[in-house]
Amino acid sequence: MQVVIAVPMSPEEYAQRYGEVRWPVLEACPICGAHARLQGHGWYHRNALPARETELVVPVRRLRCPVCRKTVSLLPSFLLPYFQHTVRFVVGSLLGKVKSYRELLRSHWRRFLANANRVLAFLRDMGVRERLPDAEKERAMKLLGSIETFGLERFSMLFHDRYHRGFMAHSSYLPRTSG
Ligand SMILES: [Zn+2]
C-alpha cells in the first residue's frame, strides 16, 4: 500500500536531500488496522521523471507493520502512484504547457477523463465553485486549471487520502474500501 506524504522539495532536491525529510510516524497500520507503530523497512528506487527525456530515480521509504508484516510506502507528493512521471509533468502536459510523447499523452488523457467526475466532486467539496463548460475536453481543461490553482501536490495528496487512489488511477482499479 502507498501513503502520499507532503515533501517540501522538488524531485531533484528530494533525490539529493531525502535524508532531511521528516517522515511521518504511523501509529496504526493502514492495512490491518493494528495499533502498532510501523517500523522502517528500507527503501526502493523508482522513476520520478520530471520532463521529457530527463531521467531521475528517487528512493522511496518503506515501513512495515509488526502485526501483519505488510509494507507501506511513503510516496512523496510530487509523484503519482504507479506513474513514472511526476504529477507536475503529467498535469502540465495535459494542459499543453510541457511536451510529452504522443502515446503517453493519449493514455494520460484517457485516465484523467475517466476520473473527471470524481475530481469535480472532490474540488466541489474543497470549496471550488467555478462554472464548467459542457464539452468534455474544455471541461477537463478547466478542471486541470482548478487543480493547478488549488495546488497540484496538495490536491493529489488530499485526493489520495480521501479515496485511497490517485486522481489519475486506472478506472478498473478498485481500492480497499474505507469510511
Ligand atoms: Zn498491519
Image: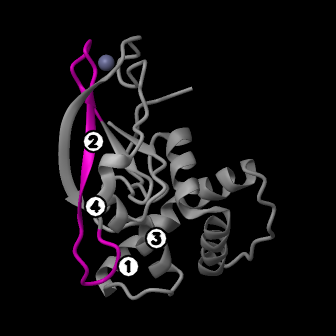
The colour scheme is one colour
Which residue corresponds to the image point at 31% horizontal and 51% vertical from the top-left? 18
Give the mark count.
4
Viewer-nearest of discs 3 and 1: 3
The residue that mark 2 highlights is 61
Disc 1 target residue:
106
Instruction: Name the foreground residue: 15 vs 174.
Output: 15
The residue tagged with tag 4: helix, strand or loop? helix
**Mark 3 burial class by Cα count in 10 Å: few <14, some 14-19, many 20+:** some
Q: Is residue 138 left or right of residue 5?
A: right
Q: Which residues are magenta?
A: 49-72
Disc number for residue 16: 4
Q: Residue at x 58, y 55 (%)?
A: 155
Quadrant of picture, ligand 1: top left
Task: Name the front one of labels 3 and 2.
Answer: 2
Q: Amino acid at mark 1?
A: Arg
Dot 4 alpha-carbon crowd within 10 angstroms: few under 14, some 14 to 19, many 20 or more:
few
Position of the N terminus, as image quadrant, is: top left
Give the number of the mark in front: 4 or 3. Answer: 4
Report whether 147 appears left or right of 85. right
User: Helix, strand or loop at disc 2?
Assistant: strand
Instruction: Return the residue at label 3.
Output: 88
Tell me residue 62's x, y (percent): 26, 37
Under circle 3, the secondary element is helix
In this view, the residue in front, 159 or 50, is 50
Whether residue 156 is in magenta: the answer is: no
- As helix, strand or loop, the secondary structure at mark 1 comes to helix
Compare residues 116 and 161 and report the one nearer the observer.
161
At label 4, the amino acid type is Gln
Point out residue 100 in the picture as x, y percentages from the top left corner: 36, 84
Please, what is the three-letter code of the amino acid marked with disc 3?
Answer: Arg
Q: Quadrant of residue 66?
A: top left
